[in-house]
Image (cartoon, rainbow, N blue to C red):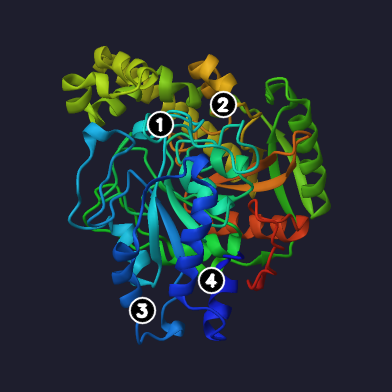
């Protein structure tokens, strides 16, 4: 099935498809992928019916996401459906949907289900989900990790079960799975997408993220979702310079930065290294002027996320369950979050001073270029490899991602090719906050140039409907 938003809207307008027919097709398709462990809760026909009824007698033109199916990471509330954060003991039944989910439903979108994830959004591999769900498997090869923590959200899009999905991204959870499943992964500027109704990991750093097949689709979802939420204490207004009119296909020459060669890390994956070198050449062929920068401020900031006091914020988020029902947490999560209990306030202030230094240096470096380009992840692992060394290898996956929210950056992950294993691999475009439309635009130009088939389904990449911009 071709589930790009533009394709579905055309089909609905031409009356060659109805939302009811599409959902029936999706339910049948889901049966083929049960062993990927995508879903924590797949909505029944009875649970879906109110969303279909909501579209009756509605004009497609007035609803940008009319009949568009989407998936929701199971740490984001959907009214009347349990939220588990991949921990049964934590499960609760929300009376109302998360603010962002409400915006999408109001625009006509239909929630298909709640997706599997690394427990309490702690992980980048997608393997930290206990029974009865289990590790979510890569859409291209079930022996490999899907990426996490937004594992099921990414795989559901890649396998053509939904048009887009919501994840969360504190340390890379909205970008690493995108890279491993051949998708667009938008990690917006902090505060632009509401966190009301989302189980926190690190409340001061968390973002809702978007997985999509194309940058056009990601931009459409972002446009509907980025509504200011007065009840979210971390919400920020989206400036005019970052609104929907700023999205398009850039035609002017541009500048981009890459880390110094000796600061790049591929963890022995020479195929990934070659793809990144090819990506640099491609970006230059598109009119980009390359600048090498000192990546040290980004790397030093990244270390603070788990080695510094910010892991204590994860402890605060689940303090009740970890102090009263610690056995309900999988061992690796207990280890990572549990050790934060004894962090001191003095450590927090020292780390904050250090972070401010790195933030200032990073902002200065990013101001001089249109964006920074890095690998999204230096390598990929099998599920067996991750299970053998779950903390170290998971840490490797965050080499290019862990600094993002600490430094208040915006980022988009975009496919860049395939490794010799046949697995997808991608790059990330990074900038200072409130540059989301600019990054989406450059990612659009990149995606339209490469013409890779998005996701796993093999459908052709739709032509972008965005205007040329200077």
| 4 or 3: tag closer to the N-terminus | 3
Q: Secondary structure at mark 3?
A: loop
| Residue topped by disc 3 | 55
Label 1 element class: loop
Report, in whole angstroms, how far the alpha carbon at label 4 lies from the one at label 3: 28 Å
**Residues at circles 2 and 4 in contact by the CB criterion of under 8 Å:** no
Q: Secondary structure at mark 2?
A: helix
Residue situated in front as seen by the camera: 60 or 442 = 60
User: Secondary structure beneath disc 4?
Assistant: helix
Residue position for label 1: 129
Q: Earlier in the sequence, mark 1 or mark 2?
A: 1
N-terminal-most mark, 3 or 2: 3
Mark 1 or mark 4, which has the lower sequence index? 1
Q: Mark 2 — residue? A: 383
Query: Against 64, is 344 above or below?
Result: above
Cβ–Cβ under 8 Å for marks 1 and 2: no
Q: Residues within 10 Å of mark 2 (few under 14, many from 20)?
A: many
- Residue designated by label 4: 245
- From the top left corner, tell me how far across and down residue 169 is, in percent: 44, 41
């Amino acid at each position: 099935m071709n589930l790009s938003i533009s394709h579905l809207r055309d089909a609905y307008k031409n009356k060659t498809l109805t939302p009811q027919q599409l959902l029936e097709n999706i339910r049948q398709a889901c049966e083929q992928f049960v062993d990927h462990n995508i879903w924590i809760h797949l909505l029944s026909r009875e649970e879906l019916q109110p969303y279909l009824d909501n579209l009756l007698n509605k004009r497609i033109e007035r609803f940008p996401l009319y009949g568009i199916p989407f998936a929701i990471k199971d740490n984001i509330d959907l009214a009347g459906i349990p939220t588990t954060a991949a921990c049964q003991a934590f499960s609760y039944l929300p009376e109302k949907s998360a603010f962002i989910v409400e915006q999408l439903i109001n625009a006509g979108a239909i929630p298909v289900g709640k997706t599997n994830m690394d427990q309490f959004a702690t992980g980048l591999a997608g393997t930290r989900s206990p029974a009865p769900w289990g590790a979510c498997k890569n859409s291209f090869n079930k022996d490999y990790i899907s990426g996490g923590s937004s594992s099921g959200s990414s795989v559901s899009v890649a396998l053509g079960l939904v048009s887009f999905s919501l994840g969360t991204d504190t340390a890379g959870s909205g970008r690493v799975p995108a890279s491993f499943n051949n998708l667009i992964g938008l990690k917006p500027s902090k505060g632009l997408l509401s966190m009301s109704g989302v189980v926190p990991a690190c409340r001061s750093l968390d973002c809702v993220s978007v997985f999509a097949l194309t940058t056009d689709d990601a931009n459409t979802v972002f446009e509907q979702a980025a509504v200011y939420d007065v009840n979210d204490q971390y919400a920020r207004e989206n400036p005019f310079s970052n609104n929907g009119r700023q999205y398009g296909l850039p035609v002017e020459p541009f500048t981009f930065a890459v880390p110094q060669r000796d600061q790049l890390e591929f963890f022995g994956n020479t195929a990934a290294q070659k793809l990144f070198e090819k990506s640099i050449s491609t970006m230059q062929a598109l009119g980009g002027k390359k600048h090498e920068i000192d990546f040290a401020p980004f790397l030093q900031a990244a270390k603070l996320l788990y080695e510094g006091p910010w892991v204590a914020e994860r402890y605060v988020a689940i303090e009740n369950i970890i102090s009263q029902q610690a056995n309900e947490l999988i061992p690796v999560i207990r280890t990572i979050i549990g050790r934060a209990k004894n962090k001191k306030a003095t450590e927090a202030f020292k780390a904050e001073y250090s972070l401010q230094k790195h933030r200032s240096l990073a902002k200065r470096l990013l101001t001089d270029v249109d964006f920074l380009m890095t690998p999204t992840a230096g390598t990929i692992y099998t599920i067996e490899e991750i299970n053998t060394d779950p903390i170290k290898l998971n840490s490797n996956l965050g080499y290019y991602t862990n600094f993002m929210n600490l430094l208040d950056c915006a980022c988009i992950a975009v496919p860049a090719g395939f490794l010799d294993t046949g697995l997808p691999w991608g790059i990330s475009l990074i900038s200072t906050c409130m540059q989301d439309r600019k990054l989406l635009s450059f990612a659009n130009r990149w995606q339209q140039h490469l013409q890779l088939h998005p996701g796993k389904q093999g459908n052709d990449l739709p032509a972008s409907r965005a205007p040329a911009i200077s």
